[in-house]
Image: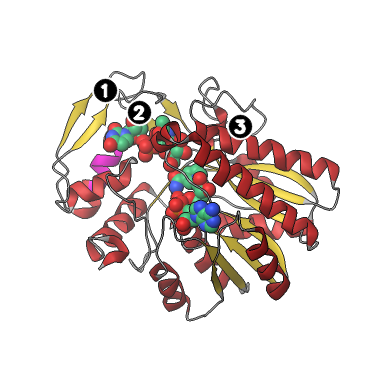
Amino acid sequence: MSILITGGAGYIGAHTCVELLNAGYEIVVIDNFYNSQKESLTRVSEITGKSFPFYMCDIRDRAGLEKIFKNEKPEAVIHFAGLKAVGESCRLPLEYYDNNVSGTLTLCEVMQQFGCKNLVFSSSATVYGENNISPLKETMPAGGTTNPYGTTKYMIEIILQDLCKADKDFSVCLLRYFNPIGAHESGRIGENPNGIPNNLMPYITQVAIGRREKLSVFGNDYDTHDGTGVRDYIHVVDLAKGHVKALDYCIKNTGAEIFNLGTGTGYSVLDVVNAFKKASGADVPYEIAPRRPGDIATCYSDPTKAALILGWYAEKSLEDMCRDSWRWQSKNPNGYGE
Ligand code: NAD
Ligand code: UD1
């Protein structure tokens, strides 16, 4: 019996593979390497001292999935595979709906066919939309997403909840991630964005390493303690450990359950810049730029439900996140490419 990890070569997937192997699980990875390299999986093996099978396969490839399910007989699936760039999703909505929504449908159909009915899904705090007030709780109304990427996550949540209503043997954990940053403390695996980073931490580390001239801080006139946007940054290793707990829960239960995975603490853009400078000793020149369309002032979680039901809570500090992001960036200035 093993756990199938879709998108396991990606940023969060690779860190979760490490935690699953450390927890004694057997894993099988599938990835189409659209946004990742095989090297990340080699490094997962190096870090853990364990090997595992991986398949280059697209989740929309039904025949490919059937073969893998037949060979590997997974007991559960952790489903990371998907496209995740907000701006790109506005330009290429059909690709996003096809990859994320159709891909998940195909995966679930094959799971059902093979009697594998435990699924942990990567959702996002983006499904809370613009209208809920932080701290965000799982009981708040979801929807009102502002871009196709967010809408795919919302649609998939609904599809999986409907699946659990129709098939009482199915068990699904919908994990709503807040803002994952940081890297494994070995500095061997980390976030490796293509092109110009959209997200704050990879942009900061690329400025610090000299690949970009300066950070643009998108707005300093929000209603926050210093005027810059506030988010719930969570260390990717804490997030990965949350998947191990969610998997344990998923295997023992049925039905659909939603969990926030966040720290419950919000930090502003300037808090992160200052913490990063302190942790790295590197300079991060920045300028104040106009607000980024679609951004909200404040977004952070109420993480109580995951603590109560899964026994999971984030342990690492903003300083840990900054130190580990910097270690990864400085040891791998060009990501997995060098
Ligand atoms: P990532 O791009 O690093 O990882 C996704 C992986 O899925 C990549 O290895 C990619 O090659 C693979 N993939 C994409 N489409 C595929 C397909 N059709 N078939 C097989 N493999 C495919 O992204 P990540 O940051 O590790 O995110 C993992 C999941 O978490 C995604 O679903 C993402 O939407 C979600 N999420 C991420 C964040 C974040 O800030 N990183 C926040 C909320 C939710
Ligand atoms: C973004 C996405 C969200 C997605 C998440 C993880 C948008 C509107 N939201 O969230 O859907 O789930 O990434 O992939 O794109 N910032 C700067 N300068 C930068 C980059 C960011 O000031 O160069 C600020 C932002 O305005 C925000 C904070 O830093 O206040 C965090 O931004 P980011 O890392 O992009 O995450 P989110 O916007 O929270």
Mark 3, residue position: 137
Is residue 247 toward the left or the right of residue 181 in the image? right
What separation in Å lies between label 1 and label 3 (alpha carbons)? 27 Å
- Inspect this view and state whether residue 178 appears: yes
Compared to 246, does 96 lie above or below? Answer: above
Which quadrant of the figure has residue 46? bottom left
Compared to 143, does 334 lie above or below? Answer: below
Q: Residue 127 at x, y = what percent?
A: 56, 32
Q: Nearer the viewer, residue 330 or 167?
A: 167
Q: Residue 209 at x, y = what percent?
A: 17, 54
Residue positioned 65% across, 41% down in the render? 305
The C terminus sits in image quarter: bottom left
Q: Residue 136 at x, y = what percent?
A: 56, 30
Mark 2, residue position: 229
Does the residue at mark 3 contact the one at mark 2 (Cβ under 8 Å)?
Answer: no
- Inspect this view and state whether residue 307 appears: no
What separation in Å lies between label 3 and label 2 (alpha carbons)? 20 Å
Q: Amino acid at mark 2?
A: Gly
Is residue 300 toward the left or the right of residue 169 in the image? left
Is residue 149 toward the left or the right of residue 155 in the image? left
- The overriding secondary structure of the stretch rendered in magenta is helix
The span shown in magenta is 271-276
Label 2 CB less than 8 angstroms from ligand 2? yes
Which quadrant of the figure has residue 258? top right
Whichever of callouts 3 and 2 sits on the residue coming sooner in the sequence is 3
What separation in Å lies between label 2 and label 1 (alpha carbons)? 8 Å
Whichever of callouts 1 and 3 sits on the residue coming sooner in the sequence is 3
Mark 1, residue position: 220
Count residues near mark 2 (Cα–Cα under 10 Å), then give few for <14, some for 14-19, many for 20+.
many
Does the residue at mark 1 contact the one at mark 3 (Cβ under 8 Å)?
Answer: no
Q: Nearer the viewer, residue 59 or 219?
A: 59
Q: Amino acid at mark 3?
A: Lys
